[in-house]
């Protein structure tokens, strides 16, 4: 977009006047913030209008990305960057007496997601828009996003995230496109002239009002939108009750409806079998599908060609109700017969699986399902009946597998099976994960639908995670290889020619140093602890989950501490940095945070170890904080038990910022390993077959405790209350008796790889060389590449 500083200033002054009635000299920061966002939003709206005109003429196939989560983060800087207006806006704002950096900082993160899954959805919106594909995201306009985390006495405390107060500038309400969603009620069948008709009556109706959040692409004509639904009561409040003096009762229906879009469920990689959650799922699925069908019918006379013009992509099983809801619309609203409706449904829907963890594979109790969604239940039952019959008839060798493949079993609706039965494409998110889906979780399905299962390895929005988050590194890269990498991340490969260039390597080292100093300043402000910016920054930031093994990291830190203290170990100074939110109801996860914080308290104040070790827990880990942490990371801890992390994406973001991966052969770590080679990554621990073998043999963590003196020393210390006199009995007993993710079994190998890391770090030149090699080979992990995989292999195949 070509706008001069002068033109921008005029726009700002005009908007400030019309929105607030002020001139710049009188305005507050907050008013200028509102003004800048409004101006940018207007530019996006204009651009969107032009884009929609073009789309109407070309009428390409539309992609609808259904996701309960979009972890958008902040948008202002991203939009200005994409519109190529950042320098001009900075000057315009400065000339009016304000500071754009301060304005950036006022923007709340749109935290409409938990972690990797939600952030991936946002990275994909960025990639698809930049590449010019018409992708619309659908989700819920949660009034409260992911909770704010504070640490009080080492314990996580959650606070509501009222992001709309400052974040609603980006949302455009589209009241005229509101639709109704029906819950509960009765289902009956009636004969009519057209045959048997299903009638859903006595339902409870909720109004879904869409709000559009526009998504810009970098130097792209496209402006896509993320459509977020807000729930409200469909009936005006009950005037009769109100007149009788029953004020509260007259509002009840309002509150019941509004509850649906009130708050994001804060559980990551875990199911929350709550009724409200099911209502959320159906609410946004039904509203979105009605919207999609209506949009299609505005351009086409029939729904017969829906699969040619539309893909509805189901992001994990949370929107799996797309399957029966699309059937319902075709059968009940548009009069299709079952076979034809099923054919259209199956050819329109695609599904991505994001986990093999059994506790995250969604199931809904059939009775609860029926109570809330009676019509949908009858459709799922019929889908299941027909599917089981088909297997019985056509695949006699699979008859024994029918109970496990069915969409309904053990009194539950199994959402993953429902998706695999219906969708024309099912993909995992890394090579290993997709192989596990094929060979294990969905093996029987793969046998009968041989081409359905595929892989699309995850990718990240490099423009956000490198160009916007790490300006120093970005300018160095631009100087060396030009700016082609912004649109084609594979160009980073050209950096390899500088791997023996001392000037480049030392410049890379200086940049890392400055980014570490920046993070150290933040840590000092946020945690009141001074860390040495010359120490190695060793980072593990992600959701807290047992399988991600933050506890193993903490045990190893304690081991180092005891070695320094009791056995005179000398090592390169190290700062261990953690960031992690725990699901509020996940007790063990919260205990692990308490453990890490207790460990930090003990170590950080111990002057006898002369600053060799520091442990920092950064509260409220979120997108905007991640943007500051990744550029400063030197070691990227990706230490999940092999076979458990579907992909991981933090691993890619840190690699792109020059951190070296210390990880297991899990998820996308394997593909990072393939890209950089064994000499540029630190791999340790059991691989997936080894984990499975040990599990089959019977794993006894207590044996490790008895045979490995380091493990014993560490656990004995904890048990005796060595950490600040605190009781961590639950943790010790969990490790000795259970250790579900085999931290103790991998401990020795983890300990040894850390010694290697320590040795390599002594040679700064070698380290920087490895770092540059990692950056140079991170191109494949661009979200643009993932989007092209979806485009070529799934969406426009
Ligand atoms: C998560 C996986 C991650 C993966 C992201 C994005 C869920 C259910 N899954 O490994 O745990 O990177 O999805 O694919 O949150």
Image (cartoon, rainbow, N blue to C red):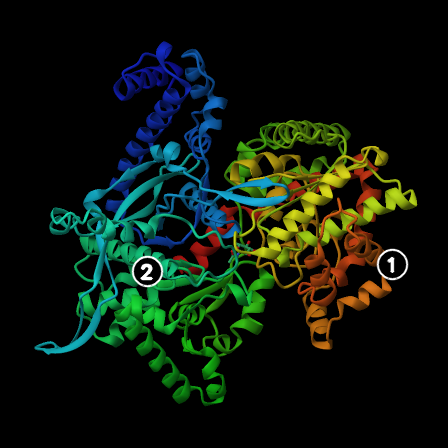
Label 1 packing within 10 angstroms: few (<14), some (14-19), many (20+): few
Relative height, residue 458 to residue 351 (above, below): above
Relative height, residue 82 to residue 316 (above, below): above
Rendered residue at 64%/52% (across/down): 591
Rendered residue at 46%/19% (across/down): 90
Q: Residue furthest top?
A: 25
Relative height, residue 289 to residue 726 (above, below): below
Question: Mark 2 to mark 1: distance in Å?
Answer: 54 Å
- Where is residue 585 shown, x and y percent of the image? 52, 55
Instruction: Give left or right: position of 526 versus 764.
Output: left
The foreground one among 371 and 398 is: 371
Rendered residue at 87%/46% (across/down): 563
The foreground one among 785 and 641 is: 641
Instruction: Write down the residue under mark 2.
Output: 282
- Quadrant of the drawing holding the C terminus: bottom left
Q: State which mark lies toward you, 2 or 1.
A: 1
Q: Residue furthest front?
A: 245
Instruction: Write down the residue under mark 1.
Output: 709
- Where is residue 695 shown, x and y percent of the image? 69, 72
The foreground one among 84 and 559 is: 559
Instruction: Give left or right: position of 531 versus 74.
Output: right
């Amino acid at each position: 977009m070509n706008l001069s500083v002068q033109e921008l200033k005029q726009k700002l002054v005009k908007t400030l006047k019309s929105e607030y009635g002020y001139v710049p000299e009188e305005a507050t920061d907050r008013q200028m913030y509102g003004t800048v966002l409004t101006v940018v939003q207007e530019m996006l709206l204009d651009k969107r209008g032009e884009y929609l005109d073009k789309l109407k003429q070309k009428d390409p196939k539309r992609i609808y990305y259904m996701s309960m989560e979009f972890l958008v983060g902040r948008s202002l800087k991203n939009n200005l960057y994409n519109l190529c207006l950042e320098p001009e806006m900075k000057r315009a704002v400065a000339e009016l007496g304000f500071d754009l950096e301060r304005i950036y900082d006022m923007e709340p993160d749109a935290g409409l997601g938990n972690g990797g899954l939600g952030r991936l959805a946002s990275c994909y919106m960025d990639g698809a828009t930049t590449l010019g594909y018409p992708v619309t995201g659908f989700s819920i306009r949660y009034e409260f996003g992911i909770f704010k985390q504070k640490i009080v006495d080492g314990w996580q405390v959650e606070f509501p995230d009222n992001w709309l107060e400052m974040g609603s500038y980006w949302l455009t309400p589209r009241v005229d496109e509101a639709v109704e969603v029906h819950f509960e009620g009765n289902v009956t069948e009636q004969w009519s002239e057209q045959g048997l008709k299903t009638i859903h009556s006595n339902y409870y109706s909720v109004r879904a009002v869409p709000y559009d959040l526009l998504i810009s692409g970098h130097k792209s004509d496209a402006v896509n939108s993320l459509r977020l639904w807000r729930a409200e009561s469909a009936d005006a409040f009950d005037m009769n009750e109100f007149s009788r003096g029953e004020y509260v009762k007259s509002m009840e229906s309002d509150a019941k409806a509004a509850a649906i879009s009130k708050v994001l469920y804060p559980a990551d990689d875990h199911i929350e079998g709550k009724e409200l959650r099911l209502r959320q799922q159906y609410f946004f699925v039904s509203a979105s599908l009605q919207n999609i069908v209506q949009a299609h019918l505005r351009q086409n006379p029939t729904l017969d060609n829906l699969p040619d013009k539309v893909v509805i992509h189901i992001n994990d099983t949370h929107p799996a109700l797309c399957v029966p809801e699309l059937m319902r619309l075709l059968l009940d609203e548009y009069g299709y017969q079952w076979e034809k409706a099923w054919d259209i449904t199956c050819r329109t829907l695609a599904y991505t699986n994001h986990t093999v963890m059994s506790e995250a594979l969604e199931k809904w109790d059939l009775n609860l399902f029926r109570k809330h969604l009676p019509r949908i239940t009858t459709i799922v039952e019929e889908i299941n009946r027909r599917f089981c019959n088909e297997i019985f008839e056509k695949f006699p060798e699979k008859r024994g597998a029918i109970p496990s493949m069915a969409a309904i079993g053990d009194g539950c609706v199994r959402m993953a099976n429902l998706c695999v039965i219906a969708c024309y494409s099912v993909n995992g998110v890394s090579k290993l994960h997709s192989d596990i889906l094929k060979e294990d979780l969905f093996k029987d399905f793969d046998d009968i639908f041989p081409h359905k299962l595929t892989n699309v390895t995850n990718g990240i929005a490099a423009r956000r995670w490198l160009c916007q988050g790490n300006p120093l590194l970005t300018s160095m890269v631009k100087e060396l290889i030009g700016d082609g990498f912004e649109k084609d991340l594979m160009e980073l490969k050209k950096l390899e020619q500088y791997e023996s260039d001392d000037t480049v390597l030392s410049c890379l080292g200086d940049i890392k140093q400055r980014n570490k100093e920046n993070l150290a300043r933040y840590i000092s402000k946020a945690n009141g602890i001074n860390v040495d910016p010359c120490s190695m920054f060793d980072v593990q930031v992600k959701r807290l989950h047992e399988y991600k093994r933050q506890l193993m990291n903490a045990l190893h830190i304690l081991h180092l501490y005891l070695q320094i203290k009791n056995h005179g170990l000398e090592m390169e100074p190290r700062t261990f940095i953690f960031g992690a939110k725990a699901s509020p109801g996940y007790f063990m996860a919260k205990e692990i945070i308490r453990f890490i914080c207790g460990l930090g308290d003990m170590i950080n104040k111990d002057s006898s170890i002369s600053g060799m070790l520091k442990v920092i827990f950064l509260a409220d880990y979120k997108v905007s904080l991640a943007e500051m942490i990744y550029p400063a990371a030197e070691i990227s801890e990706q230490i999940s038990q092999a076979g458990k992390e579907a992909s991981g994406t933090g691993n890619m973001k840190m690699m792109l910022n020059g951190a070296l991966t210390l990880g297991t052969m899990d998820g996308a770590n394997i593909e990072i390993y393939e890209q950089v080679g064994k000499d540029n990554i630190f791999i340790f621990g059991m691989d997936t077959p080894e984990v499975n073998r040990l599990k089959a043999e019977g794993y006894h963590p207590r044996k490790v405790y008895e045979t490995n003196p380091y493990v014993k020393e560490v656990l004995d210390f904890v048990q005796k209350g060595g950490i600040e006199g605190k009781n961590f009995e639950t943790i010790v007993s969990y490790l000795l008796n259970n250790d579900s993710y085999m931290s103790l079994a991998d401990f020795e190998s983890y300990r040894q790889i850390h010694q290697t890391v320590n040795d390599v770090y002594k040679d700064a030149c070698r380290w920087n060389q490895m770092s540059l090699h990692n950056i140079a080979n991170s191109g494949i992990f661009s979200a643009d590449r993932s989007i092209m995989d979806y485009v070529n292999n799934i969406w426009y195949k």
